Amino acid sequence: MSDIEREAGTPVARRQRVTAAIDRGCAYLLARQNAQGYWVGALEADASVSAGYGPLMLMMQGAVNPERQRKACRQVRRKQNPDGSWSAYEGGPGDLSVSIQCYWSLKLAGAAQDDPCLQKARAFILGAGGIGKANLITKVWLALFGQFDWRDTPSIPPELILLPNGAYINLYEFASWSRATIVALSVLLTLRPVFQAPGQVSLEELYVEPPGRRRYPPGQAERALSWAGVFLGLDRLFKFYERLPFKPGRQWALRRMEQWIVDRQEADGSWGGIMLPWIYSLAALKALGYPQSHPVIQRGLAGLEGFIIEDDECLLLQPATSPVWDTAWGVLALREAGLGADHPDLRRAARWLLQQEVRTGGDWQVKNPHTEPGCWAFEFENDCYPDVDDTAVVARALARVTLPAESEGEKWAAIGRGLRWVISMQCRDGGFAAFDRDCNRRILAHVPFADFMTPLDPTCADVTAHVVELLAERAPDAPALQRALDYFWRSQEPDGAWYGRWGVNYIYGTGLTLGSLRTLAARRHVVAVGRAVQWLLSRQNADGGWGESCETYADPTLRGRGASTVSQTAWALIGLLGAGEGDSPAVRRGVDYLLRAQQADGSWRESLYTGTGFPRAFYLHYELYPVYFSLIALAQYRAIGAD
């Protein structure tokens, strides 16, 4: 018996510790509930998001609040690595593009050339190739301030919006987040505005090449006869067209783009509830001549306040907010932990979730026009882009809460709409994607800006797993369920794991997939389940936990390897418990890891990033992931009565 196992004590002592941990976790989570009924934890990305606050305010308003600028700069400085770089995720290697954006923010705020922070950053940036090697979204950001030549950015002709939806390539073949950003970028890449930096601040020192030799193609193709080569050829053709004196339809296309942007602004002033299209939509409208006093601009700037977390020292700009997601998982965790279905706090949460149902149409209707809206989004306001993941989890959460008799009918009607909507979003391959149906035209993965902004929304095991859980509970005889299960078996990796799109990474995909099978008899008869179990068992760390780095998106050979984290340990346990491994020593060691990791206040915390925005580019840290997933894992362990 290991020291860790001896520490846990007898089976009776372990069960007592599990129950005590669950009780403390529930108390912590209930104390975090907002008075309106929802939960929302901080959502943090890399330092470039907060770094963008000052430049954005200068671009849109000509000035930035000095105290807020200082706080944003403090947030950026505290995230700098010893080698002078900034990373795309906590503990990751230095990222050139993130580092350039952070450097620009600090310099624009008044940092001197000899500032030690800038000196170290400059050495890293130049050693990594300088601005010329940055990703395209960084080059566009710099071009807006006159720090990069617009001629070396890709062309996205606004005439794209004139293509019919049935065309092989059209706006709606791009993922929702990409689509909303592309429209704004198209305006900017066409008009090429320059918002002059105050005091003639320059990034000249971050170029490796001298001025006369700065020509950077908007992408690279290993072979001319490839899709990447085709898109680079099209880019040259578009640039030739830009130089022509007569461009029929150009002004009409720009007006269509403008109207498209305005029509998709959310009630809180955002676009899609996420920062990337939000920032570039504001810049595009300013380039089109919208004054600061215009209501659309005013709403857009005012809405940023809801995404800012500020204290006496630092300002964190969140890339999005996650109240619907956090609330649904909070309800599921508390119900698994034993709170009654009619608990007053769960009823408040359920009522709030019902108020968030999206009953209006959105871009998803282009490919799914005949389904009644009845779905949920991730954020407080995002009617244009509800998603399958949130809708499936919210429907499950609502079904676990009993409302007063006069509200039960409303609740079950909403669950029914959500179920039908989710089923209607099933893709041709049987799996489910996040925001759209069959948005996976693979040639678009080679467009020039794909080096940062994932242009597709393919099916994935993790979203499909959440749908499978819903179908198993509410529609076990639906043909969609069997098609989803078939998708699982086809998409499994050769070593038994499943790839995780929206969480890091193979532990997320594998844990969620196995967990979704726990109520299905099929899990006991499929060899694939046994292979997945063996994979998870082989990846357990000596401390009893599981961990995996974001680096696995770039290097899959690292899959399932990394320092243990609470949320990834919880996902692995949920998967093993779902596969019937509750009595295994590995599960006991994993449970003991969660017990040791709990904080005195009942919470669980982690510093490493386990959420994914864009694989290989943009990652997320969810504050509440370790809390509600640990509660679910411990409650499921307690429920099976394992020793």
Image: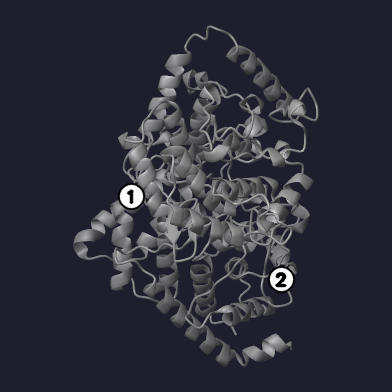
Image coordinates for residue 191, horizontal then vertical, percent: 51, 23
Name the quadrant containing residue 535: bottom right
Evaluate whether residue 551 shows in this view.
yes
- Disc 1 from disc 2: Cα separation: 39 Å
On residue 540, the disc is 2
Q: How is the image coloured?
A: one colour
In the picture shown, does residue 305 fall above or below 631? above
Residue on which the image places disc 1? 357
Image coordinates for residue 37, horizontal then vertical, percent: 32, 64
| Amino acid of disc 1 | Glu
Judging from the image, what secondary structure is the residue with disc 1 in?
loop
Judging from the image, what secondary structure is the residue with disc 2 in?
loop
Quarter of the picture containing the N terminus is: bottom right
Evaluate whether residue 366 shows in this view.
no
Query: How crowded is the residue under tag 2: few (<14 C-alpha within 10 Å), some, or many (20+)?
Result: many
Image label count: 2
Please name the residue shown 70% across and 24% down the image.
232
In the picture shown, does residue 590 fall above or below 101? below
| Amino acid of disc 2 | Gln
User: Which of 38 and 353 lies nearest the eye of the viewer?
Assistant: 38
- Single out the residue that lies furthest toward the right: 223
User: Which of 16 and 102 lies nearest the eye of the viewer?
Assistant: 102
In the picture shown, does residue 367 fall above or below 639? above
Name the quadrant containing residue 23: bottom left
